[in-house]
Amino acid sequence: MGLATENINILREKIKKLKRVRNRWINTKVLIIDEISMIDSIFFDKVEAIAKFARYSKEPFGGIQVIATGDFYQLPPVSNNKFCFESKSWRLVFNEMIELTDIYRQKDYKFKKILNEIRYGEISQETEMEIRNLERNIICPPGITPTYLFPLREEVQNENEKRLAQLNGKLYTFHSVDTGDKTLLKQIDKNCPALEVINLKVGAQVCLIKNLNNSLINGSIGVIKSFSKENHPVVYFPVPNCLVTITPQEWVIESPKSEPNDITVMAKRIQIPLILSWALSIHKSQGQTLNYIIVDLTKIFECGQAYVALSRAANMEGLQVKGFNKQKIKANSKVLTFSKLFN
């Protein structure tokens, strides 16, 4: 479906002409949707309608079993303020909902309690005092500075460019290699964490944006120590205390499988899996775990932003909070109403 910006009739015509895509719908038995909170109601209804059309079925999602996971208390859809649970087809598709209550990113009970209060927008006086105590400076490993989390992308860009300009030495520029279907490349350009162009120097603080192994994962923070003969960045990661040459990685969109080993790459981006990490946007940090962060809440404007930002921290020791204002910490009223279905 691509970005599915067209109306449903145009999307149906596209599906008619794309046999391989239609076969993908027909052969699918289970569809798993991760980060369901970021999908808006209009897009969800379009996908559901196309599933019926492609499979010649009037059943919800054309008879495909749908499993959706995510947290509606986090950031809402970007393109449309309506959550997918407000869509026409939501109640037809899902007949069972399960709430997962255990937190695994954080181990400290007190920190978990603080995060839960922020999540629901119900902050006690005790929690308010604990958060205000986090305005102190934090101690990082040698060569590492805390990553700033900002609500606005402009703040992130300004901070990273300023810090990069302060470094002496040669500037290395990496351009992505993008190949494949033009429509899908637009999708990659919009959604891929790897940037089309990234500038790096020795001494730059960077964040890994792809899992390389069990120790070097999406969100690992390091410092560039040198560049190899092939001009690949050599990065020191304090956790897990290793020096690694970072080579280009692939982000791909594959075609459907008609046979078990029949995989065709329809579009892909090849790029160094790093971004500058003196600063990150709260939106881009979603899903990551960061060991040392400074969260600036001065300009938060969205329900769930504070919760997403603060819950990126692995522990309170590595978290500094600026600009806390209890009145700005809110949970979305629609989500609060929806969550009562679990009670």
Image: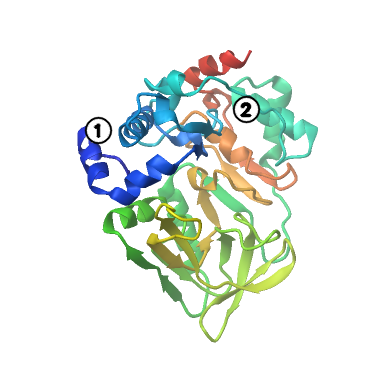
Relative to 269, say whether 88 is above or below: above
Q: Secondary structure at mark 1?
A: helix
- Residue 109: percent from the left, percent from the top? 79, 32
Q: Label 2 sits on what residue type?
A: Ile
Tell which of 195 and 294 is nearer to you.
195
- Residue 266: percent from the left, percent from the top? 36, 59
Does residue 271 show up? yes
Q: Is residue 246 left or right of 216 when viewed as pictured? A: left
The mark found on residue 118 in the picture is 2
Relative to 109, say whether 244 is above or below: below
Which part of the image, by quadrant, shows the C terminus? top right
The mark found on residue 163 in the picture is none
Give me the residue at 30% from left, 59% from top: 181
Which residue is tagged 1? 8
- Residue 150: percent from the left, percent from the top? 51, 45
Looking at the image, is mark 1 or mark 2 earlier in the sequence?
Answer: 1
Quick one: which residue is furthest to the front in this view?
259
Nearer to us: label 1 or label 2:
1
Q: Quadrant of residue 143?
A: bottom right
Q: Label 1 sits on what residue type?
A: Ile
Give me the residue at 61% from left, 47% from top: 294
Does residue 2 show up? no
